[in-house]
Image (cartoon, grey):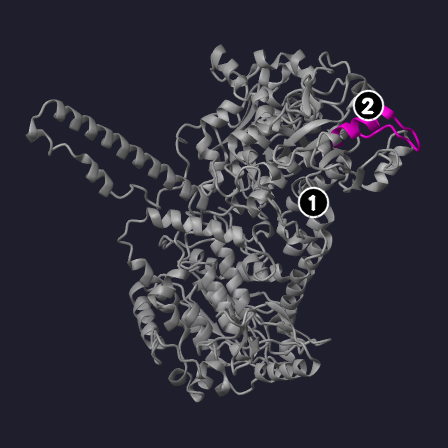
Amino acid sequence: MLAVPGIDLLFSSVPQSAEFRLVPVWLLTLANSSGTITLRCKDLKVLQLEIPGMEECLNIASSIEALSSVDSVMMMYPFFYRPQSLKLEEGWHLFPLQQYFQQIASQVSLEGRDPAMLRSSQPLTGPNRKRCREDEMLLGTVLEEGERGFIIDTRSAQAAKQARMTGGGTEPKSSYPQWRRLHRGRPLQESFIKLVDACNDTAINMDRWLNRLESCRWLSHVKAALSTACLAAQCMDREEANVLVHGAEGTDTTLLVTALAQGLLEREWIKAGHPFHLRCARSAYSHARLKQEAPLFLLFLDCVWQLSRQFPFSLEFGERLLLTLFDDAYASAYGTFLCNNEKERCLCKVKENTHSLWAWLNQPGERKKYLNPLYLPNALVIWPSVEPQSIQLWQGLFFRWIRSSQYLDEAWAEIQRLVEGNEPPVKDSAGNRLSQSLSDPTAQPENGR
Amino acid sequence: LEFILTTRQEQVKLLDRFSTSNKSLTGTLYLTATHLLFIDSSQRETWILHHHIAAVEKLPLTTSGCPLVIQCKNFRIVHFVVPRERDCHDIYNSLLQLSRTAKYEELYAFSYNPKQNESEQVKGWQLIDLAEEYKRMGVPNSNWQLSDANRDYKICETYPKELYVPRTASKPIIVGSSKFRSKGRFPVLSYYHKNKEAAICRCSQPLSGFSARCLEDEHMLQAISKANPSNRYMYVMDTRPKLNAMANRAAGKGYENEDNYSNIRFQFVGIENIHVMRSSLQKLLEVSGTKGLSVNDFLSGLENSGWLRHIKAVLDAAVFLVKAIAVESASVLVHCSDGWDRTSQVCSLGALLLDSYYRTIRGFMTFLISNLNWFQSVHGIFFRCCQLDGDPKEISPVFTQFLESVWNLTEQFPQAFEYNEAFLLQIHEHVHSCQFGNFLGNCQKEREELKLKEKTYSLWPFLLDEQKRYQNPLYNPDFSPELTLLEPNTVSFNFKFWRNMYHQFDRSMHPRQSVFNLIMNMSEQNKQLEQDIRELEAKIKQRNGQSDAFPVKEHQQPAHPAPLALKTPPCFKKEQPLIPVNDAVRTIEGSNAADNRYSEFVAEFSKAEPAVVSLEYGVARMTC
């Protein structure tokens, strides 16, 4: 039995039993031939439904098509989703931004010469190499006499040069004498699509697999993102230099780098205006190749996952949280990842009319599922290895629906059992810390700085 | 000792292999009779066994001195810079002599003395009883018997004396069959599956040429077929690519013609030969040893080397084999050319997938030296690892491939194996170290002639002594009950580069925190606590018993330490560096099994901070 209610697609293999499989409607392409509908979901799952009767099949397909491409934000699921256990409003105020800056400010004034990490968009130098006194002075005030700073431009040098033609560009050395510029950066969405294609081809032989893994360049992006973040962290940690990170608009790669270097998820990604709505519209099965689509957030999650592999005790949350965040960023019952920036969110009254994902995750029962039982608070900076030999493909995500992970899951459960059996029972506070590490920006960041 | 021209050289630099800014440590280099030792200024020691050295290379003189690169069989690569060219030349020549051994008697095993007395030495060699192992497997029985045909190594020099063959295979059949097989290696039992009554047998290729036949050989295969009451047909697996097998026909060898043998199903599985494997590994090492390697270069290098393709081919063949046995209850005869390398790989992996006993520590040791697998003389592993100065064309990483396949299985089934990665690495280390007698010699005959059991020591008791290092804390004996099949998924993306093998000594590449060590320590402590509890309970009982005997009531209350002990939280602290137990005393690396370098790199926390910031590539190299 198949039912297509407004939001979810329900599929029941045995109508009598209450066994429902929840299929998200954020599917993409429908290839119908002789009554088969192929659903490619944003969480990378692929389903094939055989529908008896061509007409029904077409009807279902068009319903799904229509429902899965709702344009208006206000018509989206989060505005209708009302779970019993949560109140609206809850979770939206876990991390007031102002409070955070106040605390940072007091920290800065207390510790004096602590290096700061700044973030911006590109300067509007343009082809005529315009200058801006105010901007130069602003950057100048960050540095004291004789201090050095690094500007990390998350675009490649060439891309930055091209940007100059359209009025953007880079900081010229002559006008910003104390700053050193470093370039990093590359395109991403295509890489993601290619990788998912390769992963779905299970009959592929070894050479072909390695070839496609290479040509998709996903792992190169992971390495580049990680090493850039390390670089930023290192500039701050070792050189005590200030770092300004910017990309073209200060919304994508820029955030990736600052977030990684700081490990502060919520503040960096959502408050600073990552256009989630544009970037995460279609996921990997997109044929439309939306120009604005880019799995930056996924790249960030992947980098965090790499860190969790190299430092299994240093992150408070487990792989499951990363997977949940990935799923929710693309399609969620919660309003947290809706819209592109704070302004849009205000317009849509997201806070008033939807639930926050953090509120859901913060419920004691839920929270426990996402914690890393091995976590040990560690204030040290962690330096991951960025050698290609140390960077792995995130199997838990890319192969989630492709191969059985039963044995790995069982092993993980066993680790959990062993560790928890060994913990003194008073470790209640651990639960509270998840929300903190996610939401409380003042918590000591574990990775990077 | 006469080879050592210099015993001590100061101001030698040890370069960081992957540093793009030529980071180095300065220290003193020593040459001993068995090892090379480097002690840096912070007193950290690097020991290299001469037998582990695969190649020494002197590079052109630079401004800082004369570079000397040493490549080891355990994939360690060290790069020294000696200030003066003359000294470098002396060291180079000494090492060249020391690392090449022409005679068995010069091997380390014959001089190594672990301070065991004679009875311990004998006991060490008796630790694993092959007869016992065959009994466990379920032979001899009504279909299989022990044959004494090869008693004096007359029929086949490279086979051991004890061989199991079908009861219906008479001596003339054996002799006839052996004459029709390359190097006389006729079909014998390798593993017997008692539930299915099916057998894995092995042999070498038949001398069939384009049309030759041998009735005895045909009888031999029929006897194997008939020894399996549950299935009348059997598989014959030729592990070579079809093309190679056909080429062999021109040399009067080849493969079985299905028309001449009744009830066989013939199958090629296409594993490449030792020469292809050797050059594949070489390519892999070239790529992984590159400085400042990009992800794309790494992946394309991995692809070009073909290494993972070969590993997959070996495992695919093993999966084919076990399916024939477990699903169809059919016996399988496996061969390649001489029945040494690919045959050993496939037969042994097959048995490992079929029998959970081989997934225990003791079982794996038994496994390696039994079933005609690796060190029960059949393999000729000695050439392959080139422990004597021999033909470099005979060297091939077939055993490394086998271990890597096992490692892949442990990754897919984290709870199925009692041993961990460190165990596999340690065995790999000692197969090349020539420190223990277990791995010397190419066949039983040669091993007997060398009097290994009197003159050398066995590795197994040393490994068992420090068993807890090699235990997989997640091992679940109930994961796969006896004789249930392990079914690996051999889809390409399940095969990964084995970093801990090929970069075992490149610490900066390893995860800085080890979950396994953490859990190992925890369960160690739990065991200790449980034992404490038991002891205390025993004491209480004893006391209670005493007080029963002497009814003095007031003494019953005071002595009750048990509840206290129960309440005390485990003294385990996560902050402790996760160095495995009893690692306090460092001895010569590789000089005894108690020294497990694995702990060196897995165990530490990230106190690490990059010592040098190199921004010239825009990439921060984090070296710890």
Q: Quadrant of residue B55?
A: top right
Q: Secondary structure at mark 2?
A: helix
| Magenta highlight range | B205-225
Q: Is residue B273 above or below residue B117?
A: below
Q: CA distance from mark 2 to mark 1?
A: 29 Å
In the figure, residue B347 lies in which quadrant? top right
Q: Amino acid at mark 1?
A: Asp
Quadrant where the C terminus of chain A sits is bottom left
Compared to residue B350, the image places residue A315 above or below, namely below
Q: Secondary structure at mark 1?
A: helix
Residue A60 on the magenta span: no
Vertical placement of B511 versus A358: above or below?
above
Q: Residue at x 38, y 54 (%)?
A: A375
User: Disc 1 designates what residue?
Assistant: B316
**Chain letter for mark 2:** B
Amino acid type at mark 2: Ser
